[in-house]
Image (tube, grey):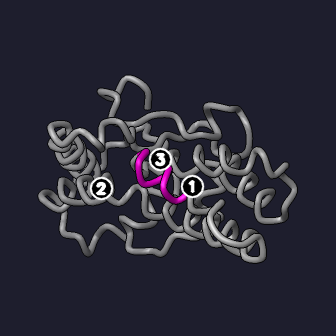
């Protein structure tokens, strides 16, 4: 999917050469943050739908993380693992307390940022871990790990909406499944 106007970027598994689906691409989060680039995703959705309507095979390796929501199917954590194994293994290690305490904040910060959360919000969330008594520290870490899981499931929402919008201009949405 490289060379497609940078609308898509290799998945995390492809970048670090681990896990499955190393050939698949996901939305370029930098482009999704730039509103002036949004029409490109809508247009790409139209092109995908035209290709589908005319039975034109297109070599487009997108993960279940993109196809399932377009088809109206719910996402699961296994769909994230298929494109970002590092995210889930890091969260599991943090939740099991297998990470040195001095590294937890940095790891959580990086994981929050990888879910397209703005820096100032991610920083506040991680900073609040250290506030209060030590009794609830691991509970707060597990809650933050759960939040990161949920954020990773919805981080593609903008791209999916734009792609869906473009596809639905050419195809009836009932056909997406």
Neighbour class for label 3 at 10 Å: few (<14), some, many (≥20)?
some
Check disc 2 and report its element: helix, strand or loop.
Answer: helix
Check disc 1 and report its element: helix, strand or loop.
Answer: helix
- Which mark, by number, is residue 63? none
Residue mark closest to the camera, 2 vs 1: 1
Residue displayed at 49% across by 40% down: 25
Residue under label 2, please give it.
Answer: 158
Neighbour class for label 1 at 10 Å: few (<14), some, many (≥20)?
few
In the displayed structure, 48 sits above or below 177; it is above
Q: How far apart are the alpha carbons under marks 3 and 2?
A: 16 Å
Residue under label 1, please give it.
Answer: 127
- Residue 163: x %, y % from top left: 26, 53
Residue displayed at 37% across by 23% down: 3
The reply to whether callout 3 and callout 2 are in contact (CB within 8 Å) is: no
In the displayed structure, 155 sits above or below 147; it is above
Check disc 3 and report its element: helix, strand or loop.
Answer: loop
- Residue 45: x %, y % from top left: 24, 49
Q: Residue furthest front?
A: 132
Which quarter of the figure is the N terminus placed in? top left
Q: Residue furthest top?
A: 3
In the displayed structure, 100 sits above or below 5; it is below
The reply to whether callout 2 and callout 1 are in contact (CB within 8 Å) is: no
Count up the numbered dots: 3
Q: Earlier in the sequence, mark 3 or mark 2?
A: 3
| In-front residue for pair 103/74 | 103
Residue displayed at 29% across by 27% down: 5
| In-front residue for pair 167/58 | 167
Q: How far apart are the alpha carbons under marks 1 and 3?
A: 35 Å
Would residue 7 appear left or right of 123 to someone viewing this image?
left
Residue mark closest to the camera, 1 vs 3: 1
> What range of the chain is rendered magenta?
119-126
Residue under label 3, please give it.
Answer: 62
């Amino acid at each position: 999917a490289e060379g497609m106007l940078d609308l898509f970027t290799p998945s995390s598994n492809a970048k670090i050469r681990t896990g499955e689906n190393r050939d698949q691409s996901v939305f370029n989060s930098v482009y999704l943050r730039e509103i002036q680039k949004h029409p490109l995703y809508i247009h790409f959705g139209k092109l995908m739908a035209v290709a589908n309507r005319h039975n034109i095979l297109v070599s487009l390796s997108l993960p279940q993380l993109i196809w399932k929501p377009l088809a109206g199917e719910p996402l699961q954590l296994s769909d994230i693992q298929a494109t970002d194994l590092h995210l889930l293994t890091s969260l599991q290690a943090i939740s099991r307390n297998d990470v040195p305490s001095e590294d937890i904040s940095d790891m959580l910060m990086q994981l929050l940022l990888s879910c397209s959360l703005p820096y100032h919000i991610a920083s506040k969330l991680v900073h609040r871990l250290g506030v209060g008594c030590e009794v609830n520290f691991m509970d707060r870490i597990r809650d933050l790990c759960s939040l990161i899981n949920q954020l990773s499931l919805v981080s593609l929402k903008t791209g999916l909406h734009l792609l869906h919008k473009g596809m639905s201009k050419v195809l009836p949405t009932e056909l997406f499944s």
